[in-house]
Amino acid sequence: MKAVLMRGYGGPEVLEYADTRDPQAEPGEIVVDVHAVSLNPADWKVREGLRKGDVKARFPHIPGRDFSGVVRKTGAGVSDFQPGDPVFAVNEQGCEGGYAEAVAIPAALAAPKPDFLSHAQASALAMTGLTSLRALEDEAKLRAGETILIHAGAGGVGGFAVQYAKHMGAVVYTTASAANHEYVKELGAHHAIDYGQEDFAEAAPPCDVVFDTIGGEVHARSFAVLKPGGRLVHIAAGPPGFTPPREDVCVIRPDVRRDRAHLGRIVELAASGAVRPPYIKEMPLADAAAAQEISKAGHVRGKIILRVR
């Protein structure tokens, strides 16, 4: 099969679109013929060696965490899927392999793909939805009537979070470039803050929850907008050596464990119209290196999806 092989740590030149061995279905696993795979900012960070603690790559390494496709084979003990079933999934934490024509994954981590979502749309909702639900539903326990600031609302995770927070009845503020204000308001944001012209710490009101998808200095400055007793939930770290400046707020880094139940929850939200797929930019799998560089440059609206079939 064809796959994107990471030959080592470094720049885009370490990625090669080449032939490799087909995966086999071990007991409890399914082999999926991938139709679309999502590109995440974590992908280029793994490539550059910035996530060695999260992903232990053995070279050649195949990147890619969330994907959608059709079951090719089932391993021993698998009874809930059959060859030909459309599915979408997120690989186990620390495991990758989606940048390929086929991938093996534990069947328990996959969910049926509904007909109303294309493979590109399902892959675009998988990790973004899983992360948002773990962060806001499971950890921050966002409630109706609360005020939330979501950083980077035009991005993949941020865009899902904006929609979910609106669905939950929260008052939603989000940071976004001026060019993306209309987009984030279509997703459900009540107020958009232009991070290029405004200081969100001054523009946002006191918030019950901040969802930080950026990290660094944004993480550090987010404490200024939290109410006493507020919750800062984040998926990116603060500056090196940073210590939270307040003891009257809760700081949470969610454990984004993978399971079928949360993927099913995403399908329910999409079926009800509470969330919709993000804006999608499709690129061929062979162009993965260029796609990662676009992601690294930032300012991606929605999701970049690598088309496999």
Image (tube, rainbow, N blue to C red):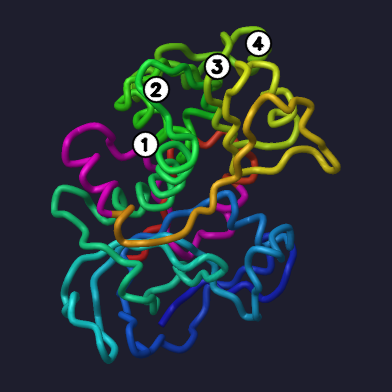
Residue 277, percent across and down?
Answer: 31, 40
Q: CA distance from mark 2 to mark 4?
A: 18 Å
Q: Earlier in the sequence, mark 2 or mark 3?
A: 2
Q: Earlier in the sequence, mark 1 or mark 4?
A: 4
The residue that mark 1 highlights is 279
In magenta, the rendered stretch is 264-293
Which residue occupies 44% across, 41% down? Answer: 132
Q: Earlier in the sequence, mark 1 or mark 3?
A: 3
Query: If the image is split into quadrants, where does the C terminus sit?
Result: bottom left
Left or right, 139 with reference to 70: right
The residue that mark 4 highlights is 197
In the foreground, 52 or 257: 257
Q: Secondary structure at mark 2?
A: helix
Amino acid type at mark 3: Cys
Left or right, 97 with reference to 164: right
Amino acid type at mark 1: Tyr
Which residue occupies 71% across, 65% down? Answer: 52
Residue 18, percent across and down?
Answer: 52, 78
> Crowding near pointer 2: few (<14 within 10 Å), some, many (20+)?
many
CB atoms of marks 2 and 3 within 8 Å: no
| Residue 207 badge | 3
